[in-house]
Amino acid sequence: MKIALMDSGIGLLAATAAVRRLRPDAELILSLDPDGMPWGPRTPEDLTGRALAVAEAAAVHRPDALIVGCNTATVHALPALRARHEPALPVIGTVPAIKPAAAGGGPLAIWATPATTGSAYQRGLIKDFAGGVPVTEVPCHGLAEAVEHADEAAIDAAVAAAAALTPADVTAVVLGCTHYELVAERIRAAVRRPGGPPVVLHGSAGAVAAQALRRLDTAPAPGAPGAPVDGGLTVLLSGREGALPEAALAYAEGRLLRTAAAAR
């Protein structure tokens, strides 16, 4: 079984690691776009063109499913990607985990990129899935870029700035950008209030990985007897075969994949 994941950069690492844990026997194809990143500032048309090219590079390897490991690309390019590749290749998008966060009933915050914060897309998700629950939209200036470059000082500064905009009474924080899941523990520490309620973080990686397996009608099989520990890893950089970006190795998810690749 082959599963491809695509993004402009290393935001796809969280979903990739989730897939690896659920199906260690799956061959993984990671399609990144270092020549075109970041995608966030691009027009929807330009971004869609870049996403289609990255998906085509992955499709050459004949995967059984394609995960769009990027919230922004899902918003703007998912319809075009599905029109191009389905039904032959199931395409799974990434949506912020607003619905499960709202199910807790307490006030919640949505950390997202400035472009996504306040967007019609995000407001629509809030309306559909968080009715009656107080929601604060928190723009995280520079956080995705800092995570992409593993810039420790910039990550700390961006997390602190976003935490300062997060109300003290929130009980849940939605990580509305896939990059943020790579620094989840830093975010958890930053929003922890002395004497306040515990704060639950809601990412999308696990749900996206599980959805991909459901689309393939394949059950998770971690540690299945006789299954390979590593199904293999191919990294594509704007269509060229290469290696994981060095910054990926600053995160546990990237180191997990490096270990797997070294075992091939």
Image: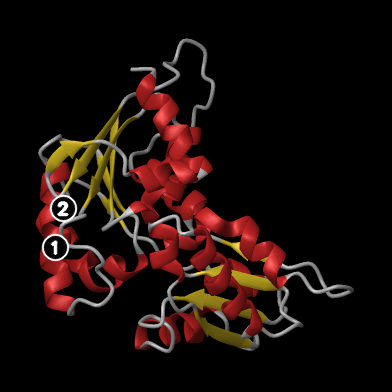
Q: Which residue is drawn at 44% across and 31% down?
A: 23
Considering the image in quadrants, where does the C terminus appear? top left
- In the image, is residue 38 above or below residue 260? below
Q: Is residue 22 left or right of residue 49?
A: right
Q: Is residue 103 left or right of residue 15?
A: right
In this view, the residue in front, 213 or 109, is 109
How are the residues colored? secondary structure
Which class describes the residues within 10 Å of circle 2: few (<14), some (14-19), or many (20+)?
A: many
Q: Where is residue 161 in the image (x, y as percent from the top left)?
A: 58, 80
- In the image, is residue 167 above or below residue 143? below
**Quadrant in the rendering for residue 42:** bottom left
Q: Mark 2 points at which residue?
A: 54
Asked if one can make out residue 201 in the rendered structure from this viewpoint, the answer is yes
Q: Residue at x 39, y 48 (%)?
A: 247
Tell me which amino acid carries mark 2. Answer: Val
- In the image, is residue 249 above or below residue 37? above
**Quadrant in the rendering for residue 196:** bottom right
In this view, the residue in front, 191 or 211, is 191
2 and 1 marks in contact (CB < 8 Å): yes
In this view, the residue in front, 174 or 156, is 156
In this view, the residue in front, 29 or 222, is 29
Asked if one can make out residue 219 in the rendered structure from this viewpoint, the answer is no
Q: How far apart are marks 2 and 1 (CA)?
A: 6 Å
Q: Name the residue under label 1.
A: 50
